[in-house]
Image (cartoon, grey):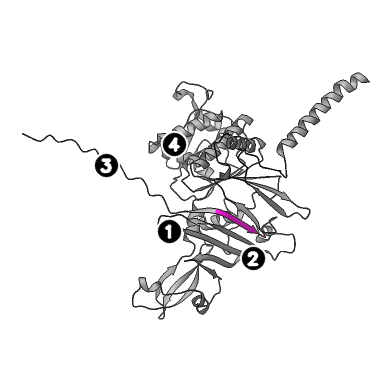
Amino acid sequence: MATKRTATPPTPPAAPARPPYMLIEEIRVQGYKSLVDEQVLHVRPLTLLAGTNSSGKSSIMQPLLLIKQTMEAPYQPAGALVLDGAHVQAETAGELVSKVGGFDEQFVIAVSGRDISPGFERNIFFEQCYRVNEKLFNLVYQKTDYNKEMITLTPLMTPGEIGSIMSFDSQQKLFPGVKVAYGEIFHANCFLQVQMRHESGQTMGRRLFTRTIESEVARLMHVPGLRSAAKRGYHITFFQNEIKGTFDLYAAGTISQWQQQNNTEALTQLNDSLQRLGLTNAVTAKVKNANEVELSVNRLPPTSKTKPRKADMVNIADVGIGVSQVLPILVALIAAQEGQIVYVEQPELHLHPRAQVAMGELLAEAANRGVRVIVETHSSLLLLTVQTLIAQGKIANTDVGLHWFTRNAKGATEVQYVVPDEDGAYGAWPEDFSEIELKAQDAYLTAVGLRQFGEAAS
């Protein structure tokens, strides 16, 4: 009797391996613009930056973005940093250093966190100092911890100086029987590394001290406050892990990528988010040619329950500006992987107050999924929404960090860091948004009273 064979189900494709990454926990900046004294940005799952205009909120992220745009440059810059790029725009190095307190025309950026790549769990520290040289920046020094040792490199170190701070013993494992004689400094983007050489001068390998921090900076998603206006066609872009430029350039291409991959989960989440914001309930991408993709949105009210017809879909340029401005934020929050930083400037722009509340909820939900969300905002509604979510138990208070930026009488930035309590209270706010709103309402009611009752009394 023949044995009945059962069909073997096809093996599903393996899930893509999670890229190695570090969790950035602190960013320290000193000497950059109004950040005269060292100021610390504590990176939590949901990190909030608030304060008055020109108080230094953007400045604390810009040194890291300068490094990022230098890594992305298709050319070797004359100075140590690319000053005019997608993330930061300056004409001279002198524009970016502090003018208060006689600081020595240099700035320092330090980043610390934990490498949680499988099998490589360790603390990470990285620090660089840049000094103005005429109109450019020179890299003064670079500090990194390597095998639990702090390694300080400078661009002009001699082989003897390098040998005095490094042990070449581990190199024997790579080149058994061949003795490493010396090392020399070489530049890789804006980073300093060590080239290992045999006594004959033969190249033997390199010590890359900044691989983890470079990987994390490369995949940082930056959604700027000045986002691209709605267009009838967007560049076709491909998002996988690293991001070159600002993420608003990737939104349309990522939606098209999701459609081609039949990623219904991401597309459904995107449409649901747009509906919660009260903007639309459907967005689609259509490849126009080899260079462009067109975005269309449903013109009917977002509360519509019917499946949008082709005739109901219109080009994104023909609807309100809110959709095009919020789309890069939503796509970034959905596409970001665990531990990846999404830095969003002013997510509340062009949004109705009800939509600002929904945006606060979406930012918190992304943080709960493991995304590291850094938000610069002027919206009191967004801050109040986060407080409410904490009180409702929808996000842990310890996962939220609020930074208040103010400037003192000398013009220097001071940052006050607050972890909300379990009720969502931020404590004593240096700038109480709700108090300002109450004062504005009181001024209006007083004016109306004087107009009506004052005239009657006369």
Please report the residue visible at 44 percent of the width from the left and 25 percent of the height from the top: 310
Sequence-wise, which precedes: disc 2 or disc 1? 1
* Tag 1: amino acid: Phe
* Tag 4: amino acid: Ala
> What residue would you read off at disc 4?
266
- Measure how far apart labels 4 and 3 are at the Cα level: 23 Å
Q: Which residues are magenta?
A: 25-31
Which one is closest to the eye, mark 2 or mark 1?
Answer: 1
- Measure how far apart labels 2 and 1 are at the Cα level: 33 Å
Write down the quadrant of residue 201 in the picture. bottom left
Taken as a whole, is the magenta stretch helix, strand or loop?
strand
Above or below: residue 369 compared with residue 73: above
- Measure how far apart labels 1 and 3 are at the Cα level: 30 Å
Please report the residue visible at 70 percent of the width from the left and 66 percent of the height from the top: 104
> What residue would you read off at disc 3?
11
Q: Dot 4 surroundings within 10 Å: few (below 14), some, or many (20 or more)?
A: some
Q: Are marks 4 and 1 in contact (CB under 8 Å)?
A: no
> What residue would you read off at disc 1?
120
Q: Is residue 65 magenta?
A: no
Which corner quadrant holds the N terminus?
top left
Sequence-wise, which precedes: disc 2 or disc 4? 2
Sequence-wise, which precedes: disc 4 or disc 3? 3
Label at residue 131: 2
Please report the residue visible at 12 percent of the width from the left and 34 percent of the height from the top: 4
Using the image as rendered, state which of residue 217 and residue 292 is in the foreground: 217
